[in-house]
Image (spheres, rainbow, N blue to C red):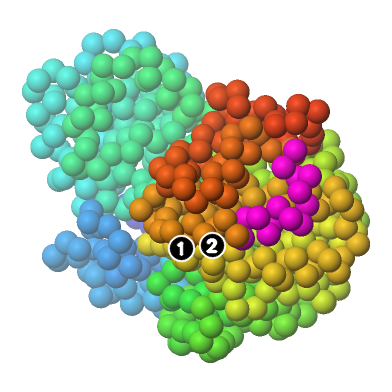
């Protein structure tokens, strides 16, 4: 692939290498150059415009929208790369961070705000492939793709002296106000005076000499106000220096989701910098480890290969047909516009073949649209309002499924998100395996660990068995499903909890071809909302109100005795025992205990033999549930002990002949552990 880059030579500005450098005077004054530049650009198949700056000077009155229209009319595929202040909204940033430089008096807040708003609006109107060079910018451009900055590893990889003496600390602020220099230098001067560090502020040093500067530094202090990182931090890491900066949890999470790597930048704020540096000065082994991790990270993420993949996937190799053809409709139900619905929607539309159907449940559409911002105008986003007055997620999910028209459908919680490219990857898995349903791997958004439900067998992901792969333990239908498969399936109306049980039983035990997307990007469950809907405490009768509909469904389906046992065992373990462990012992009044005992017995009656596969502690717990004289404290204690694999009675089954049953505790636990290990190793290879 042939490519060239052009740059305008700005006196006193950055002097990055370019194939074609245009003097500022020529750029501003030469009419012949402008016309020639348009003809030259029109000869290329693709043009990437950076920072929304006009590339033909005054030819179109510095109007980048007109430039894009002209190039597009000439058959050129135009994309945009945002870099920072061009789209970073000061108002949003100042509201989200106490360290934001946009809260400082005297900063050109209004001008920066208006320019960022203008550029975001332009990108929203043009709807061209959009990229951002730093992950924090996705807060302002949720429809963009992170395309990591690139550094020349050979240039920055130099021999480093050993760690000895005081910690050698450097800080090279290109913009001291933005970097937070005045906030950190009192701490640095104090530690320098104590001999803990040797501090050097880098000023007026040519960029060509910076590799040597970083190679002779133990620690490079980057920025402490924006919450992200850029070229300078990556150059420091490439040199093997320990980079210390303030990076937000969101930035770190995005890096891990996109790359599989923990960001090796040591996080610090102006308030925590002193203890962070003292700790580093004491721990030379940690310095060695972080230095190696930093170089590894930059080698894998910022050497240009990942950036090229992102550009190819979301721009160069994609076709307009592929971009516009919606193959999967994803229903997102939201009842509160303060939830992170923008995160959920952005994650869907980053998959080129996915469309988000947002159903505003008993909340005005306008509030959700305001939260979505420019995403609400995305061609693959539908925002629908449902006012039914029923406190059940079934209503909005069913309404969204009724609106869906794509061949595939999926559901997504308003607090959750898909990892980058998940929808496209699941569609590819469906084609490869000829599956009717692709079950997504679920990861914890806080830890990045896989949630091992269902704990499927190794090497069977392409053809799942509902019993051997323990599918009953995945109640939420997360992933994608053929719309024809669910034509007659809907979430159980009116239920506040358990509305998805009938739905999942029909999917897993309905004879469909099922696959598990173990190695694909995952569905990410977040717990950062004030209170997840599914975590809200309810009366026992409400939590288990799904039972009559489930019983009727099971009677109408052609289920084998083993199917019934698997479903009953899951309902007892997850729904009944979960009802106990999630409540304080004080909750259990005599009336509540009586309801629990009656409902539990009615579940057991569906398949009494299911108890044979349960552990001895679980059987004891079932007896305690049935005996309302058992104290609530013992009830809660047993519910917690049943998952403690260190207790032999939590592993051994009541009927030892069932010890090795696939859903007995021993094999279930080993399968869950194996899945976690497999998905960890897969992620490490990303």
Residue 534 visible here: no
Residue 632, image x, y percentages: 42, 47
Q: In this view, does 548 lie to the left or right of 530?
A: right
Residue 483, image x, y percentages: 81, 72
Helix, strand or loop status at disc 1: helix
Helix, strand or loop status at disc 2: helix
Q: Main secondary structure of the magenta part?
A: helix
Quadrant of residue 283 in the image? Answer: top left
Q: Does the magenta stretch include residue 189?
A: no
- Contact between labelled residues 1 and 2, with CB atoms less than 8 Å apart: yes
Q: Nearer the viewer, residue 39 or 282?
A: 282
Which residue shows up at 91% across the image and 62% down it?
A: 558
- Mark-to-mark CA distance, 2 and 1: 6 Å
Which residue shows up at 60% across the image and 27% down it?
A: 649
Residue 624, image x, y percentages: 54, 44
Residue underneath mark 2: 595
- Magenta-drawn segment: 599-612
Q: Nearer the viewer, residue 478 or 125?
A: 478
Q: Does the magenta stretch include residue 610?
A: yes
Q: In this view, does 444 lie to the left or right of 29?
A: right
Residue underneath mark 1: 591
Which residue shows up at 21% across the image and 38% down it?
A: 272
Q: Measured along the vertical axis of the image, is residue 671 above or below residue 535?
A: above
Q: Quadrant of the C terminus?
A: top right
Q: Measured along the vertical axis of the image, is residue 169 above or below residue 535?
A: above
Quadrant of residue 109 in the image? Answer: bottom left
Q: Which of 317 and 490 is in front in this view?
A: 490
């Amino acid at each position: 692939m042939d490519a060239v880059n052009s740059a305008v030579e700005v006196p006193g500005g950055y002097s990055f290498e370019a194939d074609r450098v245009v003097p500022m005077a020529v750029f501003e004054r030469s009419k012949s150059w402008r016309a020639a530049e348009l003809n030259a650009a029109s000869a290329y198949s693709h043009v990437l415009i950076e920072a929304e700056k006009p590339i033909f000077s005054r030819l179109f009155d510095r109007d980048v929208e007109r430039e894009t229209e002209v190039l597009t009319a000439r058959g050129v595929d135009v994309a945009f790369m945002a870099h920072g202040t061009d789209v970073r909204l000061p108002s949003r940033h100042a509201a989200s961070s106490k360290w934001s430089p946009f809260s400082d008096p005297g900063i050109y807040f209004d001008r920066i705000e208006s320019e960022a708003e203008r550029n975001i609006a332009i990108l929203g109107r043009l709807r061209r492939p959009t990229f951002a060079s730093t992950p924090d910018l996705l807060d302002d451009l949720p429809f963009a793709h992170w395309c990591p900055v690139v550094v020349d590893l050979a240039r920055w990889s130099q021999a480093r002296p050993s760690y000895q003496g005081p910690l050698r600390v450097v800080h090279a602020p290109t913009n001291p106000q933005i970097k937070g220099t005045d906030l950190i230098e009192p701490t640095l001067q104090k530690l320098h005076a104590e001999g803990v560090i040797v501090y050097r502020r880098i000023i007026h040093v040519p960029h060509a000499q910076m590799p040597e500067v970083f190679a002779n530094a133990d620690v490079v202090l980057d920025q402490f106000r924006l919450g992200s990182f850029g070229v300078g931090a990556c150059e420091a890491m490439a040199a093997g220096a320990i980079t210390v900066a303030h990076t937000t949890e969101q930035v770190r999470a995005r890096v891990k989701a996109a790359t599989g790597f923990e960001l090796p930048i040591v996080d610090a704020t102006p308030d925590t910098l002193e203890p962070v540096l003292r700790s580093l000065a004491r721990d030379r082994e940690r310095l060695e480890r972080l230095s190696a991790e930093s170089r590894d990270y930059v080698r894998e993420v910022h050497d240009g290969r990942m950036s090229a993949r992102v550009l190819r996937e979301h721009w160069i190799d994609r076709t307009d047909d592929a971009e516009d053809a919606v193959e999967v409709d994803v229903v997102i139900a939201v009842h509160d516009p303060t939830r992170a619905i923008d995160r959920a929607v952005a994650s869907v539309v980053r998959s080129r073949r996915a469309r988000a159907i947002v159903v505003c449940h008993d909340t005005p559409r306008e509030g959700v649209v305001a939260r979505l911002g420019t995403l609400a105008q995305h061609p693959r986003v539908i925002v629908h309002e449902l006012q039914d007055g029923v406190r059940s997620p079934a209503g909005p999910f069913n309404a969204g499924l009724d609106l869906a028209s794509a061949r595939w459908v999926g559901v997504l919680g308003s607090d959750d998100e898909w990892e980058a490219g998940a929808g496209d990857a699941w569609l590819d898995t469906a084609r490869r395996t000829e599956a009717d349903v692709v079950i997504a791997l679920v990861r914890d958004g806080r830890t990045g660990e896989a949630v091992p439900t269902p704990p499927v067998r190794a090497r069977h992901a392409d053809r799942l068995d509902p019993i051997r792969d323990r599918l009953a333990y995945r109640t939420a239908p997360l992933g994608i499903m053929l719309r024809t498969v669910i034509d007659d399936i809907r979430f159980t109306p009116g239920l506040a909890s358990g509305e998805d049980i009938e739905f999942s039983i029909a999917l897993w035990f309905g004879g469909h071809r099922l696959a598990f997307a173990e190695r694909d990007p995952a569905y990410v469950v977040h717990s950062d909302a004030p209170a997840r809907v599914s975590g809200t405490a309810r009366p026992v009768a409400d939590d288990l109100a799904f039972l009559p509909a489930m019983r009727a469904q099971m009677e109408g389906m052609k289920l084998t005795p083993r199917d019934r046992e698997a479903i009953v065992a899951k309902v007892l373990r997850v729904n009944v025992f979960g009802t106990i462990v999630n409540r304080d012992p004080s909750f259990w009044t005599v009336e509540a205990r009586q309801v629990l005992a009656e409902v539990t017995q009615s579940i057991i009656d569906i398949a009494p033999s299911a108890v044979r596969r349960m552990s001895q502690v679980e059987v004891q717990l079932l007896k305690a549930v049935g005996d309302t004289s058992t104290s609530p404290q013992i009830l809660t204690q047993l519910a917690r002990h049943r998952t403690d694999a260190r207790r032999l009675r939590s592993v051994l089954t009541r009927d030892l002949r069932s010890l090795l049953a696939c859903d007995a505790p021993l094999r279930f636990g080993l399968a869950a552990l194996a899945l976690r290990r497999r998905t960890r190793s897969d992620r490490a290879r990303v």
